[in-house]
Amino acid sequence: MIGGLFIYNHKGEVLISRVYRDDIGYVFQDVVGWRNAVDAFRVNVIHARQQVRSPVTNIARTSFFHVKRSNIWLAAVTKQNVNAAMVFEFLYKMCDVMTAYFGKISEENIKNNFVLIYELLDEILDFGYPQNSETGALKTFITQQGIKGQTKEEQSQITSQVTGQIGWRREGIKYRRNELFLDVLESVNLLMSPQGQVLSAHVSGRVVMKSYLSGMPECKFGMNDKIVIDKQGKGGASDDAGKSGKQSIAIDDCTFHQCVRLSKFDSERSISFIPPDGEYELMRYRTTKDIILPFRVIPLVREVGRTKLEVKVVIKSNFKPSLLAQKIEVRIPTPLNTSGVQVICMKGKAKYKASENAIVWKIKRMAGMKESQISAEIELLPTNDKKKWARPPISMNFEVPFAPSGLKVRYLKVFESKLNYSDHDVIKWVRYIGRSGIYETRC
Amino acid sequence: MPAVSKGDGMRGLAVFISDIRNCKSKEAEIKRINKELANIRSKFKGDKALDGYSKKKYVCKLLFIFLLGHDIDFGHMEAVNLLSSNKYTEKQIGYLFISVLVNSNSELIRLINNAIKNDLSSRNPTFMCLALHCIANVGSREMAEAFASEIPRILVAGDTMDSVKQSAALCLLRLYKTSPDLVLMGEWTSRVVHLLNDQHMGVVTAAISLITCLSQKNPDEFKTCVSLAVSRLSRIVSSASTDLQDYTYYFVPAPWLSCKLLRLLQCYPPPEDGAVKGRLVECLETILNKAQEPPKSKKVQHSNAKNAILFEAISLIIHYDSEPNLLVRACNQLGQFLQHRETNLRYLALESMCTLASSEFSHEAVKTHIETVINALKTERDVSVRQRAADLLYAMCDRSNAKQIVAEMLSYLETADYSIREEMVLKVAILAEKYAVDYSWYVDTILNLIRIAGDYVSEEVWYRVIQIVINRDDVQGYAAKTVFEALQAPACHENMVKVGGYILGEFGNLIAGDPRSSPLVQFNLLHSKFHLCSVPTRALLLSAYIKFINLFPETKATIQEVLRCDSQIRNSDVELQQRAVEYLKLSSIASTDVLATVLEEMPPFPERESSILAKLKKKKGPGAVSVTELEDSKREGGELNGGGDRGPDTSAMSASNAVSRHSVTSNLSYVFQSTPSPSADLLGIRSSAPAGTAPASAGNLLVDVFSEAGPAAPSAAVNDDGFLRFVCKNNGVLFENQLLQIGIKSEYRQNLGRMYLFYGNKTSVQFASFTTSVSCPGELQSHILSLNVQTKQVEPLVEGGAQIQQVLNIECLTDFSDAPLLNIKFRYGGALQNLTLKLPVTINKFFQPTEMSSHDFFQRWKQLSQPQQEAQKIFKANHSMDTEVLKAKLLGLGTALLDNVDPNPENYVCAGVIQTKGQQVGCLLRLEPNAQAQMYRLTLRCSKDSVSRRLCELLAEQF
């Protein structure tokens, strides 16, 4: 039960405030009520002297859950002991919905669309309980153009759809071409020791779909999940068990879109669902085993006296030569008393950015199984501080056209019994994108 | 960025600052700062030498970044380089950076000190000032070490410019405050005093701050400043407002200087020189006169400046406390302020009047403003002003206006702020007690108090009523009647129920004749409140019930019924259950005779200091209730303050009677010793004879009083000075309150003694103008040559938490009976504190023990057989009659304890010789305890009759 939801700009001014329950005000023992809750968050979190790192803050027995999108703070407030995961899930959904409606979440966009936001908030939270937050469904009755003379039938249709069993999809959708887009988006996180030992690594991935299908199709999604493959291997008397064993992946945990039938997943571990119309996130997952690390960073830092530092960094791409990695950026931190930097690199561009205390090396494209190197000479100003430089890790950004977790889509079948199109008539597109999360190597 | 303009504009700095101001977020600001830092680093690192201007600019930027809260770890060297520049602005920025950023243990300090030295020895006044400011701003010990000797020289040198002198004086003041040990007094001190005569007012203003500080530490060395200050003051006061030009502030001539002069004079006693004094009085009169003049300007600054001087003058008048005329005039002036529009003025007037009220000269004058003050109490909007008004009412109260003031305070209580209610209640209670002429008024007042502000009435207040009612026969009937009536109100406070229960339990019989308050009606009334009360009150009520059984046998059946019911006899609270069970048994088993003895009426309480007064002292420190006032209350309330510090829980009392007289039902006494309720504590003390240890569940005043005495002299009655506690011991704590602790260590040999006094400041604030003096009242002076106070006077400043020591040498010339008085004065937080204590120097301290055989003893005993040589006293034991304790006390007395002398081994026999300078006085002592009756017979025979009388008086209090 969320007591209220506030949206602030970076100065701590309230842009949107929607209170669902009275209790959040009373804590602060004032006639003005929730106004104080609003101020409490601004004072204790946004303008806090120390940066507040915890997403949950408890002030005067009231909990504030916040997420930050660029310069905008979204804070859900409650006095009760709620499920924090639920609140955050809601906040993320809220962000998704807003992005779907008006693009980037920025102060200007929020100010321009405040009526819409209040409308959305009225719809997706009732008395503090989250309701239907499916963008596609919401878009049918909350529009930016205003609702033009809907007929009685259409209105009743909306009611039955919102209250019905399949709230995320309305009936009677028709497309001339049945199309389906499937994106596997992964971000790979790594922390590596200077000697090349992996200290921690995991991949968090999402399967995002865009479906343009007629009627009420039933879909079935299959991937190289280790449990499924093993089961088939055992049941189906194994044609090539060795090969499939290698290619299956162990998924640590996953969550699904509400359209997925969980009972079926629990019993058969098969993912079947009636998809919402348009774009949605089918599932999220995380893996930690057998991760393909797209890049290896080899740092070499040498201190020459008190006033000089030599840095050499080699990066090696570690995937099929036919693939191309993009948007590669290596960030090499420099000491705080740097007074001058000379950089030489073979490929791409490198620059010392004083405002960020780092050398930033950018490479547009790089094929697999290649290597490249940069060397820099850093001049230092002697200081009277005896503190040693902490040597923060070298971090890296990139984008590769494959899934570092090794996930493969095996099939996506569409069944629509009422309308006369079959699985073969659906045009399907699959794309894999692997991005860097926090990809760091200590030096 | 290149330095475009070479002027002082520092465009780069302005651009940088405006960039930072325009940053939208913290991240952006950090980015901008990082960029700037990198730029400065590359500039400083660059091979090209920077010119002064850019160096200054970058150092300035660094300073700005530092002040924004970021760490700066370079640029110090560049700043130090700036110091040696010849341009004022560059030097200034260098000094600024150093005073903000360089910490004392930096390696650069040597370079910096060198630069400062150069500047100090330069002839350029601005450079000297910059250097002095830097020293003062840093003010570290290292700075003091390097320059403490240099600065006084600059200060008193004849050719120093005025502006430099000002800076030097203030700089020296700063160094003196941080490390007084390094600033050595020398020949310059006398010349500093003469700066008061300087032509330049600025120099005088700066110098006087220094002199005030120095003279607080060494008043003697700066004594000469008094006459100089007076003449300076008179010159300012008598000058027309146009004379001083620059130093005239809104038509007031040199207000700051005047205030400082007046404050300096407050460090000293009134000048002895008649001429000087005359001049000073004239000045003060002029200041008072000026306050009467119509204001020369409507501006608030004008009146502020004028009033600042006036209030400082008034506090000087109060400090001197010797000019009745001035005091009365000051009082009248303050009276006018009482009705002023400005709340602050009213506050200050009330505050100053509080101090005026304690002066004997102006007490009457203060009293004339009673109506205004009462009005202030009622109508002031600001609670702090009301608080002051209440304080003042309390201070101005005496016999003549007590009834009015108490009535006003009572009526104010109903609407008073919660924060001051408890204090108000205490004050009302004290005033009512102190100035009570008839007790019915007193009882009425206190009952009213409980009715109005029951929640704020502390235990002590109602203990006190009971003590007084018990001790005064004539009010008992009235009290019972009033209490009975008060209890009839549908809702009455629990404290009222307590008082009611106690008083009706004791004196219910006095009103039982009236059919409207027949025993059963009384009982039913009490019992109707029973279920609404907390456990301690219920326990008290149970005791009242058992007393009822004794008082009115006809209620026995009803009360037994009540005691027998499950809610009592099976109560989940152990104390209540046990009382119910035992009282029930007691009432059914014991005969009426036994009941009558066990449940006899309470004996009167011994005389003690009012517990409420102790509580108020505890609350406020002695500032609010000065010692004179305490003594006052003793004198005036003597006949009334019958009470002691015992908690008057009926049960406790009755049981203690039982224990001491008949040792009835051992389990009854057990109840009270074992149960952890507060009443048990009280009793524990009373009947602690066997254990000798008070079960100190402290927090209770009463317990404190006893435990303080310690086992060496258990529970000597706390007299105002703790004087009597020291008859039998030489070391201990003489006095203690919230501010100050005074410890004593003394040793005596023959007729000589040495006493160490330790004054400990218990607060975290320093005491200013701390002075002590020892005086010998009356003829004592000729009897005891004492007190050539050794070491110099105690330090006038006692830092928070510090302890200082003073040594007194004492010589006994001849026997004496009085004790010397120790007077302590000091300022705590601006308020003058004044304490007078009796020093525990008694005649027995000069005892030499004499061992003798039984035969010798009785021979001498017979020799001293003249009636005036013998003093005898029979008295009740106040404390435990434990043999070991008694022996320890007698040895502490200084005599020899003789064994096997008296035929009765129970008796104690002692002998000793008192050594005075002129003669020796032999003393024989015999103490015969009677354990059954808890009595002692003390007999003393001395060769001198006055000695035996005095010793007898002293000793009678000890056992």
Image (tube, coloured by chain):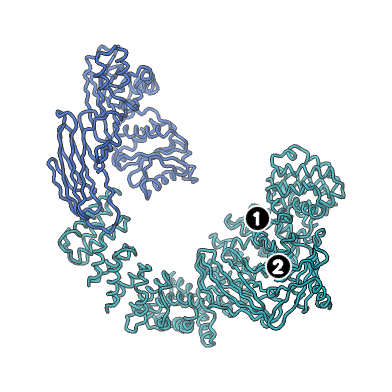
Which chain's residue wears label 1? B
**Rendered location of residue A127, percent (x, y):** 44, 32
Neighbour tally class for label 2: few under 14, some 14-19, many 20 plus, Cα within 10 Å = some
Q: Residue drawn 77% across and 47% down?
A: B668
Q: Quadrant of the C terminus of chain B?
A: bottom right
Neighbour tally class for label 1: few under 14, some 14-19, many 20 plus, Cα within 10 Å = some
Q: Earlier in the sequence, mark 1 or mark 2?
A: 1
Q: Label 1 is placed on what type of residue?
A: Asn
Decide which of A240, B590 is in the foreground and name it: A240
Camera-nearest label, 1 or 2: 2
Decide which of A386, A184 is in the foreground and name it: A386
Is residue A89 left or right of B700 when viewed as pictured?
A: left
Distance from the alpha carbon under mark 1 to that under mark 2: 32 Å
Q: Secondary structure at mark 2?
A: helix
Q: Label 2 is placed on what type of residue?
A: Leu
Which chain's residue wears label 2? B
Is residue B302 left or right of B859 when viewed as pictured?
A: left
Q: Residue drawn 75% across and 77% down?
A: B922
Q: Image height check: is B244 above or below B372?
A: below
Q: Image height check: is B225 above or below A85?
A: below
The quadrant holding residue B140 is: bottom left
Decide which of B10, B843 is in the foreground and name it: B843
Chain identity for the colour cyan used in the image:
B
Q: Which residue is mark 2?
A: B891
Q: Which residue is mark 1?
A: B700
